[in-house]
Amino acid sequence: MAVIRLTLAGLVLLLVAGLVQAGAIEVREFDDPVMEQRYRSLTASLRCPTCENQAINDSDAPVSQDMRERVYLMLQDGRADMEIRDHMVERFGNYVLYNPRLEGRTYLLWGLPALLVVLGGILVVLVVRARRNASARALSDEERARLDALINRGRTP
Amino acid sequence: MTRRLILLLPLIAFLVLAVFLYQGLSLNPFHRDSALMARDFPPFDKETLRDPEQRVDESLFLGQVTLVNVWGEWCPECKREMPQLLDLADRGIRLVGISYKDTRELGLGFLQDFGDPFEVNIFDPEGDLSFELGVYGAPETFLVDRDGIIRYHHTGYISPEDIRKHILPEVAKWQ
């Protein structure tokens, strides 16, 4: 009985802790569901500058709060998603983008996976060809003689 | 011979990867490239901390190399770096403060308690000017050259060693 009571108490505590955590991030009301969706995806794709790895929609750092506020205001102002992202990068640097932009210094980052797939494909083709050539190659005279000898030995016990 | 080389491929790939990842170990995860380097100090028009009647704007930075320090009464690291800032002011370096998300009362109390190395303090209670500067936590310090262009950005606490190693050489470079 005591165990059950303790478990229940623990669960209630967890629930309360969750509520307190949720209270740190404000809820915003949107009339337009599309706008709300954009707000959600923008705040999920922008990274909190003081945190190691947290999106601003998930962080109660003061700067994240300010950034959410700015995203909200710019959305209300009719700005495009791209503009809002650029606005943040201009102030806080490329660090805030979870998806790095395609530019000179990120070509390797974006290109490497595709390059590896292509290289892997070439490797597979080469290996398969080599195997096929090896199995199709005719036996040399010496090998044929050995093979005949083995077959004959099996036939004449 | 080529077969042998092919057998060596995984080892070579491993070595390349190992060197690449080993370099990553020495990177500081708290380091961020400042986005404002070599850009104009953002335009503003603000009251000073001491006097609501007195307004200052970005022309404040023209003609002199200035260290701009973003601080707040609520920030313990700011208190710790005050002696270093007072030392810089004693060396004749011009300092301008940005009072970040404080009330006037708390800000002035801070200067009373910990000393005032600043020529003037820009009052930024909402933090909107600091947002334009990409400040993500106090203290942060910017070096602005005589043309009002940001040349150096230090995030976080300034230690006496930082003064010697980074701040003084940067100031000398742009003076």
Image: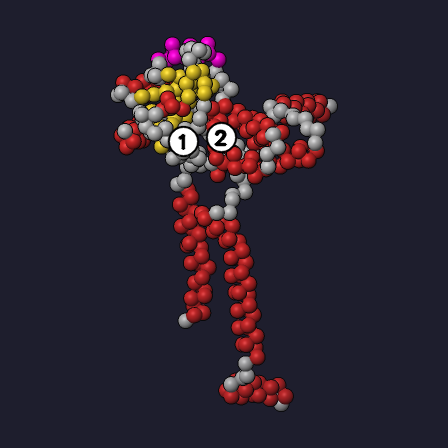
Point out residue A8 in the picture as x, y percentages from the top left corner: 70, 24
SS type, badge 1: loop
Residue B113 relative to residue A82: left or right = left
- Please, which chain is the residue tagged with disc 2 on? A
Amino acid marked by disc 2: Thr
Badges 1 and 2, same chain:
no
Tag 1 residue: B40
SS type, badge 2: loop
Residue A14 visible within the image: no
Tag 2 residue: A50
Magenta highlight range: B103-115
Asked which quadrant contains residue B133, the reply is: top left
Q: Nearer the viewer, mark 1 or mark 2?
A: 1
Residue extending furthest toward the right: A1
**In the depicted view, which residue is nearer to us: B4 or B42?**
B42
Residue B175 visible within the image: yes
Point out residue A14 in the picture as x, y percentages from the top left corner: 65, 25
Residue occupying image coordinates x 45% and y 57%: B13
* Quadrant of the drawing holding the N terminus of chain A: top right
Residue occupying image coordinates x 45% and y 23%: B44
Residue occupying image coordinates x 35% and y 13%: B115
**Residue B15 belongs to the span the image colors magenta:** no
Q: What label sits on residue B82 in the rendered view?
A: none
Which secondary structure class fits the magenta region best? Answer: helix
